[in-house]
Amino acid sequence: MRCAIVDDYQNAALAMADWSRLEGRVAITVFHDHLDEEDALVERLSPFDVIVIMRERTPFSASLLARLPHLTLLITPGMRNAAIDLEAAHEQGITVCGTDSHPAPPAELAWALILGLARHIATEQHHLITNGPWQSTVGMTLAGRTLGIVGLGKIGTRMARIARAFDMEVLAWSEHLTPARCAEAGVTLAESKRALLSESDIVSIHLVLSERTRHLIDRQALSWMSPAALLINTSRAAIVDQSALIEALEAGQIAGAGLDVFEQEPLPSDHPLRRLPNVLATPHIGYVSDTNYRTWFGQAIENIEAWLAGTPIRRL
């Protein structure tokens, strides 16, 4: 039995779990680079019975799945992955399994972006190491400001708890969010999307991408934000209209954006979001943490063992 681990950018997969448990039963091959072209992926992956993927770095479309004749088990970190055509996988008899995932790492990364933007950390650090001006910016105090959370699930709720530790006011909104849920989380329900965007100093997005949430933050929504406001997106890129966001940032319509997700990943070298001075961006590392990696790869091994025993677990 052959297993491929793909898109292991950090060379971390083998170090984060005890793969020796599969020795003698499953041969493991790890790929650290990323391939975009389907033909190249087919050439690389067609010999493998099991593939362990890394979130949504490589989409597994119906056409790709159809060209992988030996694939019988596909494992994804987390229990949801929009980059896998689950219907096609099931039709082709491919078992798809997931793992647990922790809400703390993406929430912590969102706060790193908030603090980095609010206190101009990247600019001041650059000036410090290049002997530039000493104290060139004036930071934003968080205490007394308002954090607007779009989506109050596990991550959004954690964001609210941390905001209260900074003595911030917290608003929340999503299409079906209720006053009872907001009361439970200790936040105020905004009257509308417009109210949340216009009344918040910092807006942080924590929604699942769907047809309903795609481009939820569009050109009009961005126009409702204050010119001094910050937008944080560590969720999914397509929730925000990227072209409209770039226009708003270039025009100073909003003060800045903290981004960890992009419509194309890795982000092209000439992309505007790489050069805008009011953008603080990270390469989709919200989930990239020791706790998540140990859980994901450890449970991937459990999934393989259960599948070998004929009793798959954590099926999607």
Image (cartoon, helix red, strand yellow):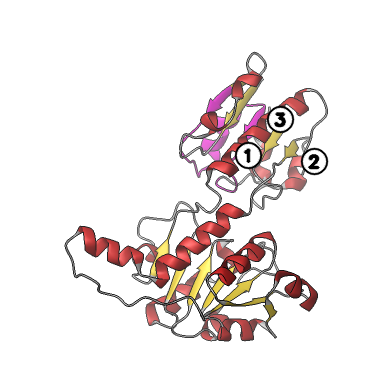
Q: Residues within 10 Å of mark 3 (few under 14, many from 20)?
A: some
Kindly identify which residue carries mark 3.
Answer: 302
**Is there CB contact under 8 Å for labels 1 and 2?**
no
- Work out whether 227 lies above or below 238: below
Q: Quadrant of the C terminus?
A: top right
- Work out whether 240 lies above or below 62: below
Kindly identify which residue carries mark 1.
Answer: 296
Kindly identify which residue carries mark 2.
Answer: 91
Tell me how far mark 3 sits from mark 1, CA to CA. 10 Å
Q: Which residues are magenta?
A: 28-57
Q: For numbered disc 3, what is the local secondary structure?
A: helix
Q: Residue at x 59, y 61 (%)?
A: 235
Magenta stretch containing residue 238, yes or no? no
- The answer to whether any part of residue 12 appears in the image is yes
Amino acid marked by disc 2 = Glu
Outermost left residue: 131
**Is there CB contact under 8 Å for labels 3 and 2?**
no
Q: For numbered disc 2, what is the local secondary structure?
A: helix
Residue 209 in percent (x, y) is at: 65, 62
Residue 144 in percent (x, y) is at: 52, 81
